Image: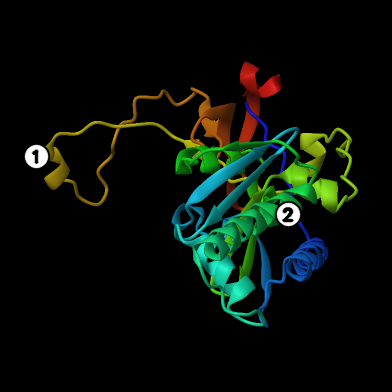
């Protein structure tokens, strides 16, 4: 049987993670002159998000994993607008546009580097990530993966963090495996009522005789009068043997033998 470690991040962990990412992105905006009045950081557990709708475009690998995904191929242009469309003199000429476009591209790469740097990533392997790999990795730790959405200036950057990456930035105390004491099954269920039934025997009769049965007719069973009767448990299996009698006005059965499997 395979066993997976289950990790559940508390709301306080999500809040701490959001605050640290918000601080890093805010510093990046100030350093690169990205002018935007809105910055929205959303941190959620991976099972609360439809991971298939995000185009994961870049993977960071070292001791743990981080995936980046963003919408559209014009992110450089959006960064360029945020950097140069407000608070700057208009960009004129081919040379200036080339330099400004290069700066926007470098700013975008720096944003990815700063976010990944929070979790100790320094080396990258760029590739399109298939959905099946993402789902397989997430299933290793159930809900332990975290999705981060960074939104500003019409830009939506998503990050998928594995458990080790989250714990690197937001350490938490892991619960030790609890050692449970042995439990005596008999003691645990000793007061639980169990239904028993007694089999008197079987009789076979054809349809003609069955239709002609009247009050006072006698059906002969296959058991002899002195044969012990089977006392059966809830699952229908025979547990005991006994003889029919009466006790205090009720029908009763005296136990005469116990099946071997019952006595083990």
Task: Look at the picture and state if 202 lies above or below 87.
Answer: above
127 up-or-down from 34: above or below:
above
**Where's the C terminus, which quadrant?**
top right
Whether residue 189 sits left or right of residue 242 in the image: it is right
Residue 262: tell me if it is visible.
yes
User: Is residue 68 toward the left or the right of residue 23 in the image?
Assistant: left
Q: Which mark is residue 208?
A: 1
Q: Is residue 38 above or below residue 176?
A: below
* Nearest to the observer: residue 80 or residue 7: 80
Q: Looking at the picture, how far across and down is residue 123, in whole percent? A: 71, 36
Mark 2 falls on what kind of element? helix
Q: Which mark is residue 176?
A: none
Residue in view at x 64 percent, y 54 percent: 106
- Residue 210 is situated, as x and y percent measured from the top left of the image, at 16, 42
- Total marks shown come to 2
Residue 262 is left or right of residue 90, and the answer is right
Q: Which residue is mark 2?
A: 115
Colour scheme: rainbow
Residue 252: tell me if it is visible. Answer: no
Q: Which residue is found at the position 88% from the left and 35% from the top?
A: 179
Asked where in the image residue 186 lies, by quadrant, the reply is: top right
From the top left corner, tell me how far across and down residue 183 is, in percent: 83, 36
């Amino acid at each position: 049987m395979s066993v997976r470690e289950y990790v559940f991040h508390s709301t306080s962990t999500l809040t701490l993670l959001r605050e640290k990412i918000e601080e890093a992105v805010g510093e990046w905006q100030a350093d690169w002159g990205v002018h935007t009045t809105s910055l929205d950081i959303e941190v959620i557990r991976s099972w609360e998000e439809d991971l298939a709708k995000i185009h994961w475009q870049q993977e960071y690998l070292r001791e743990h994993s981080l995936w980046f995904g963003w919408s559209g191929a014009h992110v450089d242009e959006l960064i360029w607008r945020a950097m140069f469309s407000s608070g700057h003199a208009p960009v004129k000429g081919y040379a200036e546009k080339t330099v400004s476009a290069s700066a926007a591209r470098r700013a975008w790469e720096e944003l990815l580097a700063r976010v990944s740097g929070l979790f100790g990533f320094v080396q990258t392997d760029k590739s399109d990530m298939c959905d099946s790999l993402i789902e397989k990795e997430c299933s290793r730790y159930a809900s332990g993966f975290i999705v981060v959405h960074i939104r500003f200036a019409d830009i939506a950057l998503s990050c998928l963090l594995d458990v080790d990456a989250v714990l690197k930035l937001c350490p938490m105390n892991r619960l030790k495996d609890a050692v449970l004491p042995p439990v005596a099954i008999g003691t645990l269920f000793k007061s639980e009522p169990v239904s028993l039934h007694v089999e008197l025997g079987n009789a076979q009769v054809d349809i003609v005789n069955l239709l002609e049965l009247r009050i006072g007719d006698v059906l002969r069973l296959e058991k002899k009068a002195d044969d012990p009767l089977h006392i059966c448990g809830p699952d229908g299996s025979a547990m005991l043997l006994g003889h029919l009698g009466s006790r205090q006005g009720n029908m009763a059965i005296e136990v005469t033998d116990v099946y071997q499997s019952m006595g083990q």
